Amino acid sequence: MVGEHFPLTDDQQNLLSLAEQVGRESLAPRAARWDREASFPFENYHDMRRAGLLGLCIPKAHGGLGADYATYMMVSAELGRHCGATALTFNMHSCSMMWTGILADDLDMSDAQRAEHLRYREHHFERVVRDGAIYAQPFSEGSAAAAGKAPFGTTATKVAGGWRINGRKIFASLSGAANYYGVLCTEESAAPSMRDTLYIAVPGDAPGLTVTGEWDPLGMRGTVSRTLIFKDVFVADELQLMPRGVYYQAAGRWPHMFMTLAPTYMGIAQAAYDFTVQYLRGEAPGMGAPVKRRMYPTKQIAVAQMHIMLEQTRALFLRAIQDARIDPGKEARLRAYAAQYTIMENANALCQLAIRTCGGQSMLKTLPLERLYRDSRCGALMLPWTAELCLDRIGRETLYEAGESDDSPA
């Protein structure tokens, strides 16, 4: 996934090798099934749990594999190369651990907040490492909240011993499969504000929580992203994933936390390229009688175009994930937007070119390209950083400094 000669630590190399093995042996052989059935990949999670990958972003001191941000992004891309839907749901789980773990370590908290957070997160980590729990991370509500432009409509009211949650989340990946849903909601007040965002884990079996709606989408069908309804759902204080008000700080100071959908699509782009090369060489599985097509100049030019696009995309991906930190500079923030946009758009462009290059057989469901194409088209639509929002932010933040307006003095 990272290309030859990219500098990796021993831990990174070992984790990438583990992800490649799990992906090759478990994820890839089942990918077509989850897509066909639009069903959740429980068997994949069983194998990832057994390999320890559910604890990928949990610190080693708590029994996890201790991956940092860049390592997670590379491992996630490797999983995406084998099954996009599994990698995308794995992102929701892993980010719940990463945000609660290494990301939260960078944030400013009072001594009381820090002690509270350390106490609560130890239990979250233990549920994953000891019990194999799966966490989800539903964002969308059909409003501007998931894009960071309004308070979340799902509300949390303080009650004795915890919170009462009301509202709904749409496109909630892992719906019906997660043990806990890391819900972003707004603490109820007379004047709700984004500063009042609460990040709390709602148990999947909590009374008042229901999963509703059908799931029959174009792509990413194995994510099973149905609608969650919360009606007077009680959640105990100790299930908070961050102390009150801390998520708002994270969203402003750690922008790369919202780029973690991109690795799945980086993996899909690599998979489309890999398959095309195999196909033209007559080596792709599922072809029947293998036929080489590599001798035709039109095919060679198409593969060259794909190679160039893939390398451009990979270079921006790797640079952006190395930039990730608290309070990144303006250029790093803009580069993150550019990387997100480029990966999401180029993944689909590569899949389009792969189908055109491989020809009519690529439309058959016995080969993976048509699934890769459908999955790749979904990336640019996903909040909080859709392709349009990335362009909007790049343009605005390039031309305006923070706090500047057209009424500001020249």
Image (cartoon, rainbow, N blue to C red):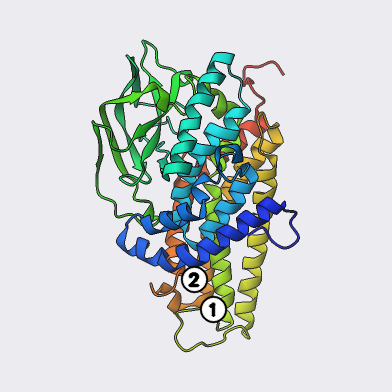
Q: Earlier in the sequence, mark 1 or mark 2?
A: 1
Image quadrant where one finds the N terminus: bottom right
**Mark 1 lies on residue:** 279
The residue tagged 2 is 355
Q: Can residue 377 be seen in this snapshot?
A: no
- Distance, label 1 to label 2, CA atoms, is 11 Å
Say few, some or many: other residues with alpha carbon within 10 Å of mark 1 (under 14 / 14 to 19 / 20 or more). Answer: many
Asked whether, in this view, residue 265 is left or right of residue 216, the answer is right
Whole-percent x and y of residue 5? 76, 60
Point out the image quarter for the C terminus.
Answer: top right
**Of residues 339 and 222, which is closer to you in this image?**
222
User: Of helix, strand and loop, which one carries label 2?
Assistant: helix
Quadrant of the rendered image containing residue 57 = top right
Q: Which quadrant of the view contains residue 327?
A: top right
Horizontal side of residue 410 vs 356, given as left or right: right
Crowd around label 2: few <14 · some 14–19 · many ≥20 (10 Å): some
